[in-house]
């Protein structure tokens, strides 16, 4: 599964929003969510998915920044593992990019 630019889904801490401010002709703006161009955006994103899926990583999942792999040896277990992953994604309001998601792939 592939998340929509995960770093863009990480909300900025209220105290940090002013640090991302920029000025254009129409006024001063700041980011509400982490812009991908920030130096530590990928590392922050990796820490986020590691925290969200800490119980599943290396047991039923592999995660790398915004790419997630849910695995199982039996079909019934795979459905259970996917359900678990989707519940966590929903709980943390992470969005997936359906055009980059693939399901039912066998290993090998």
Image: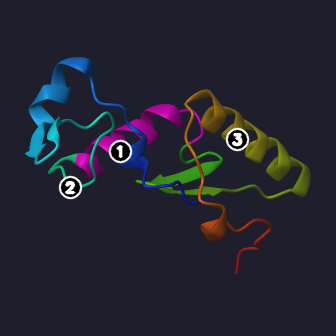
Q: Nearer the viewer, mark 1 or mark 2?
A: 2
The residue depicted at 36 percent of the width and 47 percent of the height is: 7
Indicate whether 35 appears above or below 17: below
Outermost residue toward the top? Answer: 15
The residue depicted at 36 percent of the width and 31 percent of the height is: 11
For residue 86, the mark is 3
Pointer 3 local density, CA inside 10 Å: few below 14, some 14–19, many at least 20: some
Q: Which residue is mark 2?
A: 37
For residue 53, the mark is none
Give percent across and percent down for residue 60.
65, 47
Precedes in sequence: disc 1 or disc 3: 1
Secondary element at tag 2: loop
Asked if the residues shown at circle 2 and circle 3 are in contact, with their CB atoms under 8 angstroms apart, the answer is no
Give percent across and percent down for residue 48.
40, 37
Segment colored magenta: 41-56
Q: Which residue is mark 1?
A: 45
Asked if the residues shown at circle 1 and circle 2 are in contact, with their CB atoms under 8 angstroms apart, the answer is no
Type of colouring: rainbow
Tell me the CA gap for discs 1 and 2: 12 Å
Residue 50: which quarter of the image?
top left
Q: Is residue 71 magenta?
A: no
Precedes in sequence: disc 2 or disc 3: 2
Tell me the CA gap for discs 1 and 3: 18 Å
Q: Nearer the viewer, residue 56 or 24?
A: 24
Outermost residue toward the right? Answer: 76
């Amino acid at each position: 599964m592939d998340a929509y630019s995960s770093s863009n889904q990480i909300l900025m801490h209220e105290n940090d929003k002013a640090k991302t401010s920029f000025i254009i002709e129409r006024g001063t703006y700041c980011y509400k969510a982490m812009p991908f161009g920030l130096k530590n955006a990928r590392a922050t994103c990796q820490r986020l998915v590691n925290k969200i899926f800490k119980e599943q990583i290396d047991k039923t999942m592999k995660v790398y920044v915004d790419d997630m792999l849910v695995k199982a040896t039996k079909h019934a277990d795979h459905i259970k593992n996917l359900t678990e992953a989707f519940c966590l994604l929903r709980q943390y309001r992470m969005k997936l990019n359906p055009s980059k998601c693939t399901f039912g792939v066998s290993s090998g």
